[in-house]
Amino acid sequence: MQYARNSAWRGAALLVFTLALTNSLPAQTPSTAQIVFLRFKMKNDTITLIKLNTRPGVVKQKRGGEIRGGIYYDVVSSSGKSLWNGAMEDPLVQRIEYGDPAEAGRIKIKYVTHQEAEFTLRMPFKLEAHRIEFYRFKSPVEQNRREILRQPLGSILLQMKGGEPK
Amino acid sequence: MKRFQKLATTVVFFLALLPRQVRPQATLQPLLNNGATAARLNVVIFSEGYTSQELSKYSADANTLLNKLLNTQPFKEYNSYFNAFAISVASKESGSDHPSRNLFRDTFFNSTYDSFGIQRLITISGAGRVRVDSLLQLLMPEYDIVLMIVNDPEYGGSGGFPAITSINISAPEIVVHEIGHSFAGLGDE
């Protein structure tokens, strides 16, 4: 009887422990995971890497989805294997939302175009990351063509070093 | 030359003696802790236009904004999924720029009203964005939502990164709307 009770408690404790662990552990192990901060400059659709910095932490994968007029990126290994990807709004077209006290609750939107802009991307540290490829999706000019064209914006070499936070 | 070196050493010595809050030193203060930062949505709130003497008020302002946010649906329902942190950094002057009135303030992130010809639109400069980015890397690399409170009573703010609000009581609605976009997948209006 005593053993059965102990066993039930042990089972319950194990279940709670497992649930807690499952809930708290993302894809990377928090204690060893690192985030790579990539700072870029974009000017007339030309993207250059300004700075690469590594910090401890875990990057959460954003939910996928299309961003109209956005820029897409793919981090690939030297063999071309995709390691991380994502999408973002065009850094040269700033979407600004603002309110007006005269029209409470109504949010207005303004788009501002820039000649150049800086932006930061985060990705999990992966030693095999070799380059990042940027592209847009462009609708075909010809009406009868159904496929969406992938318009490359640039491919930038990444130099991951050892994984030690700087 | 030796005289200059002596003077420089003295200046550095006295600067080092200044209390931490007088220097533009950023500090991170937890406001809400619901678990490991790797497994929660981490809200980071920056101070802008608070002088070192006003930073004690900033903590209360950050909590007010956070409560407003987490008491609004759908965030209210998912309250326990959030952590929140305040990053305090002192500005030399209080408030924000109002170029239409020829009012300019020396603030840490160089915020300004009247952006792009719209009086209520507050934005920060490119250099200000770089500062936001650097502080996030340093103090909270696992950030998810970034907000900024501008210590100015006039209504104003903007969505984007970071989402900005003034301390005006009606202003945080922009911030709440913006976060709805980012994390709840809500439509525009």
Image (cartoon, grey):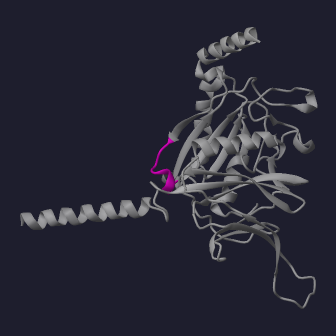
Q: Residue furthest bottom?
A: A144
Closer to the camera, B14 or B176?
B14
Counting labels gives 0
Looking at the image, can residue B171 be seen? no
| Residue ID at (73%, 10%) | B2
| Residue ID at (15%, 66%) | A7
| Residue ID at (33%, 64%) | A18
Looking at the image, can residue A133 be seen? yes
Q: Quadrant of residue B49?
A: top right
Q: Look at the image and tell me in which quarter the C terminus of chain B lies.
A: bottom right
Closer to the camera, B5 or B183?
B5
| Left or right, A4 with reference to B112 | left
Q: Quadrant of residue B101?
A: top right
Q: Residue furthest top?
A: B3
| Left or right, B135 with reference to A119 | left
Closer to the camera, A49 or B172?
A49
Q: Position of residue B144 (x, y in %)?
A: 61, 53
Q: Residue furthest left?
A: A1
| Residue ID at (63%, 26%) | B55
Closer to the camera, B27 or A77?
A77
The stretch of residues the image draws in magenta is B32-40
Q: Position of residue B168 (x, y in %)?
A: 73, 34
Residue B33: within the magenta? yes
Q: Position of residue B110 (x, y in %)?
A: 79, 34
Q: Quadrant of residue A61?
A: bottom right
B13, above or below A157, in the image:
above
Q: Position of residue B118 (x, y in %)?
A: 89, 43
Residue B116: within the magenta? no
Q: Look at the image and tell me in which quarter the N terminus of chain B lies.
A: top right
